[in-house]
Image (spheres, grey):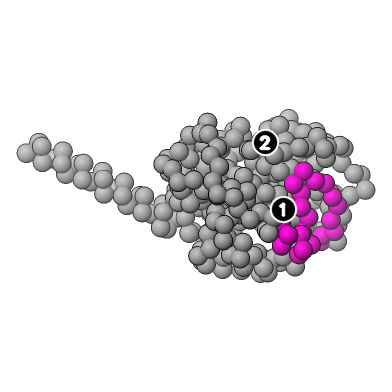
Amino acid sequence: MRKRSFIALGAGVLAAGGATLGYASLIERNLFMLRRFDVPLLEPDAEPLRILHLSDLHMMPDQRRKQSWVAALGGTDPDLVVVTGDNMADPDAVPGVLRALDPLLSLPGAFVFGSNDYRGPVWANPLRYLLSEREYVQGVELPHEDLRAAFVDAGWADLNNSRTVVKAGGRSIELVGVDDPHVDRDDYASVAGPISRGADLHIGVTHTPASRVLDAMAADGFGLLLAGHTHGGQVCVPGYGALTTNCDLPHAMAKGLHRWPGSEAWLHVSAGLGTHPTAPIRFACPPEATILTLIPR
Ligand SMILES: [Fe+2]
């Protein structure tokens, strides 16, 4: 009798585990959400300015549902679009990424790349995602130069170790960015320096929210810092949050809007819209895009 109870309990646990995994891989992974935050950053009496922040699409060619959802974000009519990398998960992903972003490419925009714009997935145990110290393994080369050319041809600013000023929403916006710190492609020193007082707004952009980069941008006076990479923890514990950020960012800042410690800067970390195809699950952390409405302080 007791043996039968154990078998029933084991079967119940297995069924619950299977149902949870099914939910995480089939349902929540596709529950795309649009989040909104107000960021009190502008001068008094300034008109609000809206930034659409996208990250971590990890696009596969056949992910039509994700492509359609992102394309519909054109209806949010942002003043500026910022994409913080990890756009691709397959060598044939460029058309799908461009199909998704097509309605946004006519708007002012800027981008940095993440490690997953350079190298594709390597198939491994999906639970590796929860290992904060896991080794970065390089997969197949991805067509990042094709993607870069498409973005730049559309007029978007390439912020990989670069600095520029763009016009958006009737404002002059100074942008600085680095290539992905997660794979040591960042070279902030080459673009460092105090913010230009001639610009109305100053934004720092990086794929991985590495403290060495965020500290340096904030010290130069950039008031809004945008990053992705964390996937918000990707597999979270309800009521607790992220178990990893896959970098030195505190777990409590795995996604959302926070003050960057020791500075006046705001940091927005996007939980992103995709998953690495080797770990195609999300739990208690739905995929997201974000509208940041900058308002007077
Ligand atoms: Fe990513």
Is residue 146 at least partly visible in the picture? Answer: yes
Was residue 39 drawn as part of the magenta stretch in this picture? Answer: no
The quarter of the picture where the N terminus appears is: top left
Q: Horizontal placement of 278 versus 196: left or right?
A: left
Q: Going 72% across and 38% down the picture, which residue do you hit?
A: 186
Q: Which residue is mark 1?
A: 111
Q: Relative to 99, does residue 128 appear above or below in the rendering?
A: above
Is residue 44 at least partly visible in the picture? Answer: no
Which numbered marker is on residue 184?
Answer: 2
Q: Horizontal placement of 246 versus 125: left or right?
A: right
Q: Which residue reaches farthest left?
A: 1
How many C-alpha atoms fall within 10 Å of the one at disc 1: few (<14), some, or many (≥20)?
many
Give the residues drawn in magenta, as a range. Answer: 148-169
Q: Going 67% across and 36% down the picture, which residue do you hit?
A: 184
Q: Which residue reaches farthest right?
A: 198
Identify which amino acid the numbered label 1 is placed on. Answer: Phe
Q: Tell me where residue 119 appears, x and y as whole percent.
A: 59, 47
Q: Horizontal placement of 191 versus 37: left or right?
A: right
Q: Relative to 124, does residue 158 appear above or below in the rendering?
A: below
Q: Going 67% across and 68% down the picture, which residue do you hit?
A: 102
Q: Nearer the N terminus, badge 1 or badge 2?
A: 1
Q: Tell me where residue 103 appears, x and y as whole percent.
A: 68, 69
At mark 2, the secondary structure is loop
Q: Could you give the CA–CA distance between mark 1 and mark 2, rounded to whole angstroms?
A: 18 Å
Q: Horizontal placement of 230 versus 158: left or right?
A: left
Q: Considering depth in this image, is 140 or 178 the residue closer to the camera?
A: 140
Q: Tell me where residue 161 appears, x and y as whole percent.
A: 77, 43
